[in-house]
């Protein structure tokens, strides 16, 4: 699926509206019809406007990306900002809700830039730029009160349900990220759920390979220090605040954290 940034007169208003909704922390109505994106290209333009505004106003840069191989039904690609990036080891992570919806993922960390260029990046090019990988969680959220009633471009403009990312311990190597693994969720030491986890794209790096070339085609790039998550191994999990959370990722390790409200 080809997407090209397609700026339009309402993109700035849409970005400002979505930033205000993020700041308020309360889900609200759809974007006004006058600024509502009508295509995936327009949705990505809203994302870029959002990133530009956050950088200019707050120096809140892009710390990570979420990405997956596109399908005929949807395209998943969105920046994740520094203000929404947390390290599990740093202590309790603030939440505005009593239940936090998360997705267990692997985050690939770039050691080298993958800038815009004319020629496509091969998988070997991207592999050479990866410096490591971590256990990670995507924190889910939406600025629309009724996301089931909005269009795909509106969801993409709102960063496809992203509220943030939690980075956990490093794994042995990026190549250790498996296509499948068991996942176990424990709360305050009690096992709550077990999943026969699998990566939705089969190959954990597939979404990163696609992202590098998608951004390249837009005249954009990935930068050293940024992390990229590429899909959940177990759909979403709902976890409580103010309790110790442990997620065991097969033989890779354990991510321990606590959300606080």
Image (cartoon, rainbow, N blue to C red):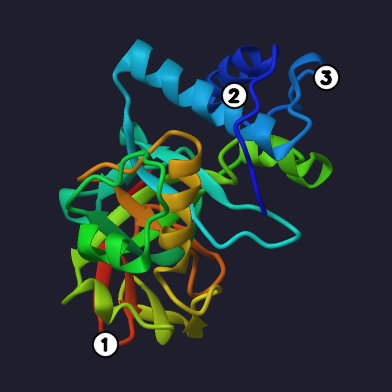
Tag shown at residue 35: none
Of the 4 image quadrants, the one containing the N terminus is bottom right
- Regarding residue 146, the answer to whether it shows in the image is yes
| Mark 1 vs mark 3, CA separation in Å | 49 Å
Q: Is residue 190 above or below residue 259?
A: below
Residue situated in front as seen by the camera: 78 or 168: 78
Residue 6 is drawn in which quadrant?
top right
| Mark 2 vs mark 3, CA separation in Å | 14 Å
**Secondary structure of the residue carrying numbered label 3:** helix
Q: Is residue 90 left or right of residue 83?
A: left
Q: Where does residue 195 sit, x and y in percent of width and height?
A: 50, 84
Q: Where does residue 40 sit, x and y in percent of width and height?
A: 69, 39
Q: Is residue 51 above or below residue 34?
A: below
Q: Residue at (68%, 40%) from the top-left corner?
A: 155
Residue marked by disc 1: 251
Q: Where does residue 189 sit, x and y in percent of width and height?
A: 30, 77
| Mark 1 vs mark 2, CA separation in Å | 39 Å
Residue marked by disc 2: 18
Q: Residues within 10 Å of mark 3 (few under 14, many from 20)?
A: few
Q: Is residue 128 above or below residue 11?
A: below
Residue marked by disc 3: 33
């Amino acid at each position: 699926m080809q997407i090209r940034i397609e700026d339009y007169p309402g993109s700035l208003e849409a970005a400002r509206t979505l930033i205000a909704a993020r700041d308020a922390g309360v889900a609200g109505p759809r974007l006004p019809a006058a600024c509502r994106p009508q295509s995936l290209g327009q949705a990505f333009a809203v994302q870029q406007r959002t990133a530009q505004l956050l950088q200019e106003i707050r120096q809140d840069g892009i710390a990570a990306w979420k990405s997956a191989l596109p399908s005929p039904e949807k395209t998943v690609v969105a920046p994740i900002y520094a203000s929404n990036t947390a390290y599990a080891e740093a202590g309790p992570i603030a939440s505005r809700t009593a239940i936090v919806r998360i997705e267990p993922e692997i985050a690939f960390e770039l050691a080298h830039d993958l800038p815009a260029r004319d020629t496509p990046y091969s998988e070997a090019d991207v592999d050479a730029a990866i410096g490591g990988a971590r256990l990670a969680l995507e924190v889910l959220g939406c600025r629309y009160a009724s996301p089931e009633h909005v269009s795909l471009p509106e969801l993409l403009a709102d960063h496809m349900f992203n509220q943030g990312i939690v980075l956990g311990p490093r794994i042995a190597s990026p190549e250790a990220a498996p296509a499948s693994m068991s996942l176990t969720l424990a709360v305050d030491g009690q096992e709550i759920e077990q999943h026969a986890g699998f990566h939705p794209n089969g190959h954990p790096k597939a979404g990163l390979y696609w992202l590098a070339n998608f951004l390249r085609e837009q005249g954009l790039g990935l930068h050293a220090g940024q992390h990229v998550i590429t899909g959940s191994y177990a759909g979403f999990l709902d976890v409580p605040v103010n309790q110790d959370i442990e997620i065991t990722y097969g033989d890779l390790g354990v991510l321990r954290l606590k959300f606080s409200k």
